[in-house]
């Protein structure tokens, strides 16, 4: 790390600049491993350092041509990038269970330095921690390559302007670029989302130009530090202080933090301060510590390039997280050392057999990677068609949501209407009961209260006679029925003059059919056995209600004459009211039950509808299913994994908001073991589950499965090239099969 400071005549090695590189590399590595939430901020340090060193290098070698600058950058930046890219393709070619549809266009974007813009177009989310490809981290290198392509011309322009006695212009221009670039980053990250700003070269160069700005200050001998801060070990202490500040930011500020935008700016400023203090401390080139730092720093670029492909490969292994992390670190460092050793052959003037051998071996492996690249197909158009199809289905879902909501609203309105009618009937129940065409058959007890009964039931008909026997009741009812006078309900008050047989009572109930029958007990001490017989008999009929006049009137001597049977004036009123209250109560309970039944029927209707859950597989077949299940709910989430789907289903089940019949439609990108599925099905207990799973067929007696895997085996054109998503033909076939089997199940 050599450059001229102030006088630019004496070259010095500044050890702490390499320390900055090492710390930044470690922070990014830990971020990629998922251990440091804000480790991505260390990329700003790389940017600042790159801008600083690029300017210092050009200023120190003013005689260097633009061609020489490019050659130097090709060797130091581009050659390792190419090697790591093709070695990654070589390694990935052995992952038979991985389909990388974007291999060719994404690799092309890496090799030609526009991967950051390619990722913007591909909408890859750098912060989601979901590894989509081994090259997601190379957006940073693309920005560096774009900067290196332009910077020599920019520097020459600065020099030309300065030679025209306008020395402050480069400081002003650099400052304006910093301000405008960061303002663009800030506003676009809020307006269009973080990725638009994070990957965009124009909105990230503020960090690079911070480094250029500091280099211009140093090269123009402008002293930013008071002399007292340069004495003794103060620069080292302050350097450590700023390093700790960065570490706190790495730990506390993640991509979702509301201070994210400002942290990008602040981390760039702190990087400048680190570099400024690092340049105040010279190092002894002969120290073993210095040599170790040099060797590690020389590997930081390659470690950055290699780490993500290694992490990517390890996602397909199953081992403890700690062991996996240790192996990733060790393998990354070893590969970086080997590649560094191999590519150093390009700059090595003396012949070295070992370096030649390693270089040839690496070249051979890269050759296989080149073959993988050239032989791969570009599925961009096919994926665009799939995206278009899924997008159209997503819009169809939004359109059908309104129809589904309207259907639900209609059902709710129908329920409300039924409940309103029942409520109205309940409110008018007194008049409804009074207007009933009630029929009464009785003996002298009822005869005494006929006037009171007519007052309460003016539309009724009461036939009562002295000394009437129960045996005559059926013939009386038949006669009344023959005259079309047999209304509903029917009140019977017989037994004071003796009981009749069970067959006799059966004949009475047969004549009355499904009418409500209210049969009063008697108060004749000599015939109390009749009451017990009647109560026991009533258990045979749901429409036979016993009015226990004996129990109700017990203790009310004023209700009866001396015989304890026939009614006094107060007794007649109480008798008639007892009949009215009993009828009212039964009708009230009936209406209340009708309310509960109506609500339950509605809830069962809603709960028994099919409810669909699925990822892209359900989305692709949606248009072929929806018309047959217009009143079903569709829950489609491309990001469903086992945990999120399980949590949603169990949560809904516990809240009683899950349909009793669910259909799971999941493609092979959804990872679920048979054991996990059985646990899920057991947790949902009485829920009926239909499963379509394009990864594996599960045999579980509690679940109905729709086997579409064999259909795919027999029809290769059912899948597109990624071997995950269905073609239009496959989607149509799956939709038809789901409809057929669900309808067969209903029948």
Image (cartoon, grey):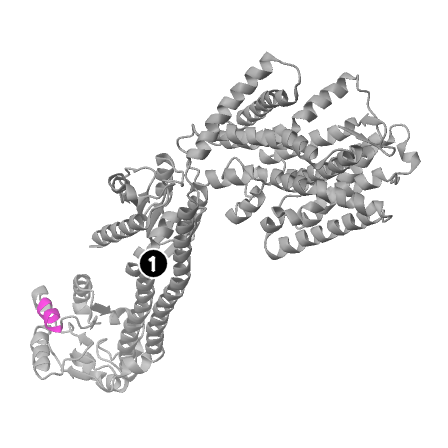
Q: Closer to the camera, 433 or 711?
A: 711
Residue sitting at x 64%, y 46%:
201
Q: Closer to the camera, 598 or 393?
A: 393
Q: Closer to the camera, 81 or 250?
A: 81
Q: Which percent across, then down, holds residue 705?
A: 27, 43
Give the answer, above or below, for where 705 lies relative to 3.
Answer: below
Q: Is residue 210 left or right of residue 406?
A: right
**Magenta stretch, overall SS:** helix
Q: Quadrant of residue 304?
A: top right
Where is mark 1, residue-wise? 632
Q: Is residue 523 left or right of residue 290?
A: left
511 magenta-colored: yes
Q: Which percent across, then down, holds residue 548?
A: 25, 69
Magenta span: 506-512
Q: Which percent across, then down, holds residue 87?
A: 51, 27
Residue 695 seen anywhere in this rendered image of the structure: yes
428 magenta-colored: no
- How dense is the environment of label 1, judged by Cα within 10 Å: few (below 14), some, or many (20 and up)? many
């Amino acid at each position: 790390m050599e450059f001229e400071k102030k006088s630019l005549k004496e070259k010095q090695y500044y050890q702490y600049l390499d320390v900055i590189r090492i710390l930044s590399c470690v922070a990014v590595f830990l971020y990629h491993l998922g251990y440091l939430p804000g480790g991505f901020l260390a990329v700003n340090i790389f940017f600042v350092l790159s801008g600083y060193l690029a300017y210092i290098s050009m200023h120190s070698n003013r005689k260097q041509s633009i061609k020489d600058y490019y050659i130097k950058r090709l060797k130091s930046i581009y050659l390792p990038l190419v090697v790591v890219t093709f070695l990654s393709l070589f390694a990935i070619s052995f992952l038979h269970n991985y389909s990388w549809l974007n291999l060719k266009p994404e690799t092309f974007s890496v090799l030609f330095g526009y991967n950051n813009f390619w990722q913007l177009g591909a909408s890859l989310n750098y912060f989601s921690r979901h590894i989509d490809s081994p090259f997601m981290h190379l957006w940073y290198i693309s920005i560096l390559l774009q900067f290196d392509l332009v910077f020599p011309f920019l520097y020459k322009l600065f020099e030309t302007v300065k030679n025209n006695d306008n020395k402050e212009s480069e400081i002003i221009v650099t400052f304006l670029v910093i301000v405008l670039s960061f303002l663009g980053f800030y506003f676009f990250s809020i307006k269009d989302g973080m990725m638009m700003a994070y990957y965009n070269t124009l909105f990230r160069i503020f960090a690079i130009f911070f480094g250029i700005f500091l280099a211009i200050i140093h090269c123009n001998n402008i002293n930013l530090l008071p002399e007292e801060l340069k004495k003794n070990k103060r620069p080292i202490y302050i350097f450590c202080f700023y390093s700790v500040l960065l570490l706190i930011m790495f730990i506390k500020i993640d991509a979702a933090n509301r201070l994210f935008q400002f942290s990008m700016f602040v981390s760039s400023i702190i990087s400048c301060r680190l570099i400024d203090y690092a340049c105040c401390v010279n190092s002894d080139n002969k120290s073993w510590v210095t040599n170790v730092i040099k060797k590690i720093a020389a590997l930081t670029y390659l470690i950055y390039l290699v780490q993500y492909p290694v992490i990517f490969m390890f996602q397909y292994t199953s081992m403890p997280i700690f062991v996996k992390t240790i192996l990733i670190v060790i393998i990354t460092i070893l590969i970086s050392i080997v590649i560094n050793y191999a590519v150093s052959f390009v700059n090595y003037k003396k012949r070295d057999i070992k370096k030649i051998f390693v270089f040839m071996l690496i070249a051979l492996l890269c050759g296989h990677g080149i073959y993988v690249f050239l032989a791969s197909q570009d599925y961009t158009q096919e994926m665009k068609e799939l995206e278009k199809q899924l997008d159209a289905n997503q819009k169809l879902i939004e359109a059908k949501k309104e129809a589904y909501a309207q259907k639900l609203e209609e059902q709710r309105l129908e329920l409300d209407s039924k409940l309103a009618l029942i409520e109205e009937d309940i409110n008018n129940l007194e008049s409804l009961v009074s207007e009933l065409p009630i029929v009464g058959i009785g003996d002298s007890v009822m005869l005494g209260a006929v006037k009171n009964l007519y007052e309460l039931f003016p539309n009724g008909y009461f036939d009562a006679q002295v000394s009437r026997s129960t045996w005559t009741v059926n013939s009386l009812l038949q006669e009344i029925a023959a005259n079309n006078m047999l209304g509903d309900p029917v009140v019977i008050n017989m037994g004071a003059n003796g009981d009749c047989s069970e067959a006799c009572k059966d004949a009475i109930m047969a004549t009355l059919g499904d009418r409500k029958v209210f049969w009063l007990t008697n108060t004749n001490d000599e015939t109390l056995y009749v009451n017990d017989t009647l109560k026991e008999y009533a258990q045979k009929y749901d429409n036979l209600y016993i009015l226990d006049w004996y129990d109700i009137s017990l203790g009310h001597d004023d209700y009866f004459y001396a015989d304890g049977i026939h009614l006094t004036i107060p007794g007649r009123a109480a008798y008639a009211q007892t009949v009215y209250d009993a009828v009212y109560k039964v009708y009230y309970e009936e209406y209340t039950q009708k309310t509960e039944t109506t609500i339950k029927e509605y809830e069962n209707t809603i709960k028994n509808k099919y409810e669909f859950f699925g990822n892209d597989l359900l989305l692709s077949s949606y248009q072929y299913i929806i018309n047959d299940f217009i009143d079903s709910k569709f829950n489609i989430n491309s990001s469903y994994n086992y945990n999120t789907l399980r949590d949603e289903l169990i949560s809904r089940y516990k809240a009683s908001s899950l349909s009793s019949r669910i259909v799971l439609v999941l493609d092979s990108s959804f990872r679920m073991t048979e054991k996990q599925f059985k646990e899920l099905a057991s947790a949902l207990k009485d829920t009926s589950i239909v499963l379509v799973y394009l990864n594996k067929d599960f045999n579980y007696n509690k679940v109905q499965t729709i086997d579409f895997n064999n259909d795919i085996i027999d029809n290769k054109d059912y899948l597109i090239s990624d071997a995950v998503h269905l073609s239009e033909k496959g989607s149509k076939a799956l939709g038809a099969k789901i409809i057929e089997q669900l309808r067969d199940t209903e029948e």
